Image (spheres, coloured by chain):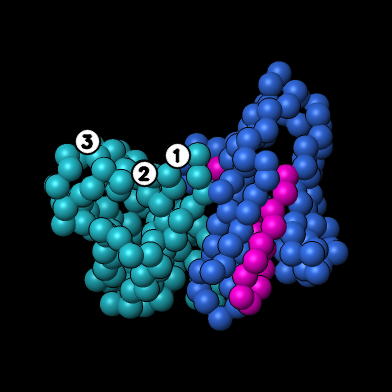
Chain colours: A blue, B cyan
Amino acid sequence: EDKVVQSPLSLVVHEGDTVTLNCSYEVTNFRSLLWYKQEKKAPTFLFMLTSSGIEKKSGRLSSILDKKELFSILNITATQTGDSAIYLCAVGIQGAQKLVFGQGTRLTINP
Amino acid sequence: SQTIHQWPATLVQPVGSPLSLECTVEGTSNPNLYWYRQAAGRGLQLLFYSVGIGQISSEVPQNLSASRPQDRQFILSSKKLLLSDSGFYLCAWSAVGLNTGELFFGEGSRLTVL
Protein backbone atom coordinates (compact mmCIF):
# COMPACT_ATOMS: atom_id res chain seq x y z
CA GLU A 1 0.00 0.00 0.00
CA ASP A 2 1.31 3.44 -0.95
CA LYS A 3 2.00 5.53 2.13
CA VAL A 4 3.08 9.12 2.83
CA VAL A 5 3.97 10.13 6.41
CA GLN A 6 4.53 13.68 7.59
CA SER A 7 6.11 14.90 10.79
CA PRO A 8 5.57 16.62 13.04
CA LEU A 9 1.78 16.61 12.92
CA SER A 10 1.67 19.93 14.73
CA LEU A 11 4.24 22.66 15.33
CA VAL A 12 4.04 25.99 17.16
CA VAL A 13 6.87 28.51 16.84
CA HIS A 14 7.49 32.23 17.21
CA GLU A 15 7.63 34.68 14.37
CA GLY A 16 11.13 34.83 12.91
CA ASP A 17 11.98 31.22 13.69
CA THR A 18 13.04 28.73 11.02
CA VAL A 19 11.05 25.53 10.66
CA THR A 20 11.65 22.23 8.91
CA LEU A 21 8.76 19.98 7.94
CA ASN A 22 9.36 16.35 7.02
CA CYS A 23 7.74 13.99 4.56
CA SER A 24 8.69 10.35 4.04
CA TYR A 25 7.10 7.96 1.61
CA GLU A 26 6.79 4.32 0.60
CA VAL A 27 5.22 3.94 -2.82
CA THR A 28 5.29 1.31 -5.52
CA ASN A 29 6.44 3.53 -8.37
CA PHE A 30 7.50 7.08 -7.50
CA ARG A 31 6.89 9.83 -10.03
CA SER A 32 6.95 13.14 -8.13
CA LEU A 33 6.60 14.74 -4.70
CA LEU A 34 4.51 17.85 -4.16
CA TRP A 35 4.02 20.31 -1.31
CA TYR A 36 0.76 22.21 -0.77
CA LYS A 37 -0.28 24.93 1.69
CA GLN A 38 -3.82 24.89 3.08
CA GLU A 39 -4.81 28.05 4.92
CA LYS A 40 -8.58 27.88 5.06
CA LYS A 41 -10.18 25.72 2.44
CA ALA A 42 -8.50 24.96 -0.89
CA PRO A 43 -4.88 23.72 -0.76
CA THR A 44 -2.55 25.75 -2.97
CA PHE A 45 0.48 24.40 -4.76
CA LEU A 46 3.99 25.22 -3.50
CA PHE A 47 6.54 22.90 -5.11
CA MET A 48 6.93 19.81 -7.21
CA LEU A 49 10.13 17.75 -6.96
CA THR A 50 11.15 14.93 -9.22
CA SER A 51 14.95 14.86 -9.06
CA SER A 52 16.98 14.00 -6.01
CA GLY A 53 19.23 16.63 -4.46
CA ILE A 54 17.92 19.63 -6.38
CA GLU A 55 16.53 22.35 -4.16
CA LYS A 56 13.40 24.23 -5.18
CA LYS A 57 13.16 27.71 -3.72
CA SER A 58 10.49 30.39 -3.57
CA GLY A 59 11.22 33.34 -1.32
CA ARG A 60 11.57 32.10 2.25
CA LEU A 61 10.38 28.60 1.36
CA SER A 62 12.59 25.86 0.00
CA SER A 63 12.32 22.12 -0.47
CA ILE A 64 14.57 19.24 -1.36
CA LEU A 65 14.04 15.59 -2.21
CA ASP A 66 16.15 12.56 -1.30
CA LYS A 67 15.04 9.66 -3.51
CA LYS A 68 17.52 7.25 -1.97
CA GLU A 69 16.25 7.75 1.58
CA LEU A 70 12.67 8.37 0.38
CA PHE A 71 11.98 11.69 2.04
CA SER A 72 11.61 15.39 1.46
CA ILE A 73 11.86 18.44 3.68
CA LEU A 74 10.19 21.83 3.46
CA ASN A 75 12.07 24.70 5.08
CA ILE A 76 10.58 28.04 5.97
CA THR A 77 12.98 30.74 7.18
CA ALA A 78 12.11 33.97 9.02
CA THR A 79 8.56 32.73 9.58
CA GLN A 80 5.64 35.15 9.60
CA THR A 81 2.13 34.81 11.01
CA GLY A 82 0.88 34.42 7.44
CA ASP A 83 2.79 31.16 7.21
CA SER A 84 0.35 29.60 9.66
CA ALA A 85 -1.40 26.82 7.75
CA ILE A 86 -1.58 23.09 7.20
CA TYR A 87 1.25 21.94 4.96
CA LEU A 88 0.47 18.86 2.89
CA CYS A 89 2.92 16.53 1.20
CA ALA A 90 1.75 14.35 -1.70
CA VAL A 91 3.38 11.75 -3.93
CA GLY A 92 2.50 11.11 -7.54
CA ILE A 93 2.52 7.49 -8.63
CA GLN A 94 3.99 6.53 -12.00
CA GLY A 95 1.31 5.17 -14.28
CA ALA A 96 -1.56 6.29 -12.03
CA GLN A 97 -3.49 9.52 -12.40
CA LYS A 98 -3.56 10.36 -8.71
CA LEU A 99 -1.68 11.84 -5.75
CA VAL A 100 -1.35 10.15 -2.35
CA PHE A 101 -1.34 12.67 0.50
CA GLY A 102 0.20 12.59 3.95
CA GLN A 103 -1.60 13.61 7.14
CA GLY A 104 -0.40 17.18 6.97
CA THR A 105 1.55 19.34 9.43
CA ARG A 106 -0.38 22.07 11.21
CA LEU A 107 2.03 25.00 11.59
CA THR A 108 1.17 27.88 13.91
CA ILE A 109 3.32 31.01 13.99
CA ASN A 110 2.83 33.15 17.09
CA PRO A 111 3.70 36.86 16.97
CA SER B 1 -8.13 30.70 -17.18
CA GLN B 2 -9.41 27.60 -15.47
CA THR B 3 -11.77 27.69 -12.52
CA ILE B 4 -13.33 25.01 -10.37
CA HIS B 5 -16.64 25.40 -8.56
CA GLN B 6 -17.90 23.18 -5.80
CA TRP B 7 -21.22 23.32 -3.94
CA PRO B 8 -22.77 23.43 -1.48
CA ALA B 9 -20.09 24.92 0.75
CA THR B 10 -21.74 23.70 3.93
CA LEU B 11 -24.23 20.94 4.54
CA VAL B 12 -25.85 19.51 7.67
CA GLN B 13 -27.73 16.28 7.06
CA PRO B 14 -29.39 13.65 9.26
CA VAL B 15 -28.18 10.07 9.31
CA GLY B 16 -29.86 8.04 6.59
CA SER B 17 -30.54 10.99 4.28
CA PRO B 18 -29.15 11.18 0.72
CA LEU B 19 -26.22 13.32 -0.40
CA SER B 20 -25.23 15.07 -3.58
CA LEU B 21 -22.12 17.25 -3.89
CA GLU B 22 -21.37 18.82 -7.25
CA CYS B 23 -18.19 20.02 -8.87
CA THR B 24 -17.69 21.70 -12.22
CA VAL B 25 -14.56 22.87 -13.99
CA GLU B 26 -14.39 25.68 -16.53
CA GLY B 27 -11.72 26.69 -19.00
CA THR B 28 -10.25 23.26 -19.77
CA SER B 29 -11.24 20.11 -21.63
CA ASN B 30 -11.01 16.47 -20.61
CA PRO B 31 -9.59 17.10 -17.15
CA ASN B 32 -8.86 14.39 -14.63
CA LEU B 33 -11.29 14.89 -11.74
CA TYR B 34 -10.92 13.87 -8.10
CA TRP B 35 -12.88 13.69 -4.87
CA TYR B 36 -10.87 13.82 -1.64
CA ARG B 37 -12.08 13.78 1.95
CA GLN B 38 -10.28 15.48 4.82
CA ALA B 39 -11.24 14.38 8.32
CA ALA B 40 -10.44 16.74 11.20
CA GLY B 41 -6.70 16.77 11.89
CA ARG B 42 -5.87 14.49 8.99
CA GLY B 43 -4.56 14.68 5.48
CA LEU B 44 -6.47 14.14 2.26
CA GLN B 45 -7.90 10.72 1.52
CA LEU B 46 -8.58 10.01 -2.16
CA LEU B 47 -12.12 8.70 -2.62
CA PHE B 48 -12.67 8.65 -6.39
CA TYR B 49 -11.01 9.83 -9.54
CA SER B 50 -12.08 9.97 -13.16
CA VAL B 51 -10.07 10.21 -16.36
CA GLY B 52 -13.12 10.59 -18.64
CA ILE B 53 -16.91 10.66 -18.90
CA GLY B 54 -18.40 7.62 -17.21
CA GLN B 55 -14.98 6.38 -16.04
CA ILE B 56 -14.80 6.21 -12.25
CA SER B 57 -12.06 4.65 -10.12
CA SER B 58 -12.88 4.00 -6.48
CA GLU B 59 -10.03 4.07 -4.01
CA VAL B 60 -11.71 2.92 -0.82
CA PRO B 61 -14.81 0.83 -0.14
CA GLN B 62 -17.42 3.06 1.41
CA ASN B 63 -20.92 4.39 1.53
CA LEU B 64 -20.32 6.88 -1.27
CA SER B 65 -20.41 6.81 -5.06
CA ALA B 66 -19.27 9.16 -7.80
CA SER B 67 -20.46 9.93 -11.30
CA ARG B 68 -19.20 11.97 -14.22
CA PRO B 69 -22.16 12.67 -16.48
CA GLN B 70 -20.37 15.39 -18.46
CA ASP B 71 -16.73 16.12 -19.28
CA ARG B 72 -16.34 18.82 -16.67
CA GLN B 73 -18.85 17.73 -14.05
CA PHE B 74 -18.15 15.40 -11.13
CA ILE B 75 -20.77 14.40 -8.57
CA LEU B 76 -20.34 12.71 -5.21
CA SER B 77 -23.42 10.91 -3.87
CA SER B 78 -24.77 8.73 -1.15
CA LYS B 79 -28.14 7.06 -0.79
CA LYS B 80 -27.97 6.91 3.02
CA LEU B 81 -25.47 8.96 5.01
CA LEU B 82 -23.60 7.58 8.01
CA LEU B 83 -22.14 9.55 10.92
CA SER B 84 -18.69 8.57 9.67
CA ASP B 85 -19.35 10.39 6.37
CA SER B 86 -18.87 13.73 8.13
CA GLY B 87 -15.86 15.64 6.88
CA PHE B 88 -14.48 18.20 4.49
CA TYR B 89 -14.83 17.14 0.85
CA LEU B 90 -12.55 18.59 -1.77
CA CYS B 91 -12.97 18.33 -5.51
CA ALA B 92 -9.88 18.79 -7.68
CA TRP B 93 -8.82 18.66 -11.29
CA SER B 94 -5.56 18.12 -13.12
CA ALA B 95 -4.37 18.15 -16.69
CA VAL B 96 -4.35 14.75 -18.33
CA GLY B 97 -1.21 12.81 -17.44
CA LEU B 98 -0.47 14.95 -14.39
CA ASN B 99 2.42 16.38 -16.42
CA THR B 100 2.63 19.45 -14.26
CA GLY B 101 2.12 17.32 -11.17
CA GLU B 102 -0.35 19.82 -9.91
CA LEU B 103 -3.89 19.42 -8.62
CA PHE B 104 -6.19 22.44 -8.53
CA PHE B 105 -8.69 22.33 -5.71
CA GLY B 106 -12.17 23.70 -5.19
CA GLU B 107 -13.10 25.54 -2.03
CA GLY B 108 -14.51 22.41 -0.40
CA SER B 109 -17.81 21.25 1.05
CA ARG B 110 -18.11 20.75 4.80
CA LEU B 111 -20.55 17.95 5.58
CA THR B 112 -21.88 17.32 9.08
CA VAL B 113 -24.01 14.23 9.58
CA LEU B 114 -26.10 14.30 12.76
Q: Are marks 1 and 2 in contact (CB under 8 Å)?
A: yes
Q: What is the quadrant of residue B101 in the picture?
A: bottom right
Between the C-alphas of marks 1 and 2, the distance is: 7 Å
Q: Tell me the kind of residue under disc 1.
A: Ala
Say which chain tag 3 marks.
Answer: B
Q: Earlier in the sequence, mark 2 or mark 3?
A: 2
In this image, B5 relative to B45: left or right? left
Whether residue A90 is visible to the viewer of this picture, yes or no, is no
> Quick check: is A37 in the magenta stretch?
yes
Q: What is the quadrant of residue A21 in the picture?
A: top right
Residue at screen point 44% across, 47% down: B38
Is residue B44 shown above or below A98? Answer: above
Q: What is the quadrant of residue A80 in the picture?
A: top right
Residue B87's disc is: 2
Asked which secondary structure carries label 3, the reply is loop
Q: Earlier in the sequence, mark 1 or mark 3?
A: 1
Q: Nearer the viewer, residue A46 or B35?
A: B35
Q: How far from the left and from the top, in percent, is residue B96? A: 50, 75
Between the C-alphas of marks 2 and 3, the distance is: 12 Å
Main secondary structure along the magenta-highlighted residues: strand
Q: Nearer the viewer, residue B47 or B92?
A: B47
Q: How far from the left and from the top, in percent, is residue A4? A: 61, 58
Say which chain tag 2 marks.
Answer: B
Circle 1 packing at 10 Å, graded few (<14), some (14-19), many (20+), is few
Q: Which residues are magenta?
A: A21-38
Asked which secondary structure carries label 1, the reply is loop
How many discs mark residues in the rendered view? 3
Q: Tell me the kind of residue under disc 2.
A: Gly
Asked which secondary structure carries label 2, the reply is strand
In this image, A6 relative to B26: left or right? right
Q: Which residue is mark 1?
A: B40
Residue B114's disc is: 3
